[in-house]
């Protein structure tokens, strides 16, 4: 069977939902600049969904989410998806219900990191049901990776189309009730970031966690990321320095492969909290490649204390529990 293009599969998916107000099919009356437009004016749809720990009847599909955390970085490959995944796992092991929204449309890596590639997105009356990655259904994940025919298929879209999908991820995914939604973003400060921040603004995100590596270039990029947060009114929860030294598995000595301390110094200089330094850890790399639960399986590894302490700092800031 020939592969259908992604837009066609999304169209088929939204036709299945038969949603009267906002679906790709009804909204494909394209605006003058190629934007998908809403079928009717107004705010988010009134939804009633009843899975998870209760039922809600409020505007929009993020109404049951308590805290939204964006994970940003100025540069690619610094470990944004890694920090998003491990933060979600650590919060889940602290007894929280967690969702992950992967808006890194051109490089969705979280399905692989959580061994969820190839899983399907289903429908309910309230929209797309995210993929539950654990048996207890404590972590749910939505990613463009689930809409691709092949895991390595490229998403070659211009900005307006990407922005429309991001808006749809925010308005049409039935998250149910969550303590935390972790949003993994692409590197940089692009249109997609603006679209994400704009779509999430009505839900008052808790703020942004900014990831950097110790090298000067990444630290320079993160400076721009902090400016982006300031200009878009997004609070910086804190800065994380990733790949910060390598702890030898034989003698436990830490070698600073890159320079060290740049992130902490930048945080001090910028007046934002520093959340911690995560060392390079081969067990972390392996567990991400194999889609294993690093927080549960590797509590003695070098990256574990830093990752749990970052999660604990977030928990300390947001003590409220779901009822
Ligand atoms: N602290 C760490 N120790 C060991 N490996 C790590 C660590 N942090 C990240 N990695 C590895 O580095 C690679 C890049 O990480 P990741 O995909 O999280 O970066 P990213 O910033 O999300 O990249 P992109 O910009 O492509 O979205 C991955 O293979 C991951 O396993």
Image: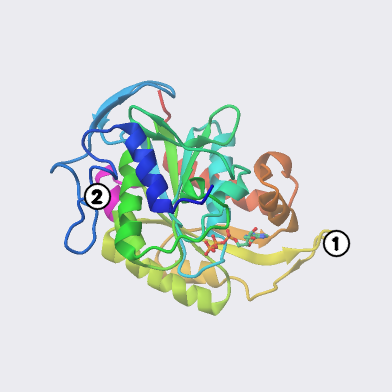
Q: CA distance from mark 1 to mark 2?
A: 60 Å
Please check the rendered image and state whether residue 204 is part of the magenta-colored stretch, yes or no: yes
Residue depicted at x 51% and y 60%: 107
Q: Which corner quadrant of the image does residue 294 belong to?
A: top right
Which residue is found at the position 58% from the left and 43% from the top? 118
As drawn, the residue found furthest toward the right would be 250
Residue 28 disc label: 2
User: What SS does tag 1 mark?
Assistant: loop
Quadrant of ligand 1: it is bottom right
Observer-nearest of 125 and 56: 125
Is residue 235 or residue 152 the one in the foreground?
152
Answer above or below: position of 70 versus 180: below
Residue beneath label 1, please?
Answer: 251
Q: Secondary structure at mark 2?
A: loop
Give the mark nearest the N terminus, 1 or 2. 2
Measuring from the top left, give residue 71's x and y in whole percent: 45, 55
Instruction: Give 155 or 304, whichever is nearer the viewer.
Output: 155
Does any portion of residue 234 appear in the rendered image? no
Q: Residue furthest left?
A: 41
Q: Nearer the viewer, mark 1 or mark 2?
A: 2
Task: Rate crowding at label 1 as few (under 14), some (14 to 19) or many (20 or more) other CA atoms within 10 Å.
Answer: few
Label 2 CA crowd tier, 10 Å (few <14, some 14–19, many 20+): some
**What residue lies at 74% left-to-right and 50% top-to-bottom?**
301
The magenta span reads: 198-205
């Amino acid at each position: 069977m020939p592969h259908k293009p992604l837009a066609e599969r999304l169209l088929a998916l939204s036709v299945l939902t038969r949603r009267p107000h906002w679906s790709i099919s009804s909204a494909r009356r394209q605006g003058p600049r190629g934007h998908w437009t809403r079928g009717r004016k107004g705010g988010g749809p009134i939804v009633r969904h009843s899975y998870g720990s209760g039922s809600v009847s409020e505007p929009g599909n993020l109404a049951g989410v308590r805290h939204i955390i964006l994970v940003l970085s100025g540069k690619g490959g610094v470990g944004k998806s890694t920090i998003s995944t491990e933060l979600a796992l650590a919060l889940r092991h602290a007894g929280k219900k967690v969702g992950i929204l992967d808006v890194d449309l051109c490089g969705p890596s979280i399905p692989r990191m959580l061994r969820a590639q190839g899983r399907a997105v289903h429908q309910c009356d309230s929209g797309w049901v995210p993929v539950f990655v654990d048996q207890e259904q404590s972590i749910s994940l939505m990613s463009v990776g689930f809409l691709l025919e092949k895991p390595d298929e490229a998403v070659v879209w211009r900005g307006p189309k990407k922005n429309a999908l991001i808006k749809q991820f925010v308005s049409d995914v039935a998250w149910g009730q969550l303590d935390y939604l972790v949003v993994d973003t692409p590197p940089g400060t692009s249109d997609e970031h603006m679209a994400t921040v704009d779509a999430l603004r009505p839900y008052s995100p808790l703020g942004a966690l900014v990831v950097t590596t110790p090298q000067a270039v990444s630290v320079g990029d993160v400076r721009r990321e902090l400016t982006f947060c300031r200009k878009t009114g997004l609070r910086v929860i804190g800065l994380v320095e990733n790949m910060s030294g390598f702890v030898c598995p034989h003698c436990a000595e830490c070698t600073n492969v890159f320079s060290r301390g740049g992130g902490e110094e930048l945080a001090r200089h910028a007046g934002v909290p520093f959340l911690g330094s995560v060392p390079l850890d081969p067990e972390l790399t392996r567990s991400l490649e194999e889609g294993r639960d690093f927080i549960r399986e590797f509590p003695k590894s070098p990256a574990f204390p830093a990752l749990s302490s970052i999660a604990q700092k977030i928990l300390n800031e947001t003590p409220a529990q779901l009822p």
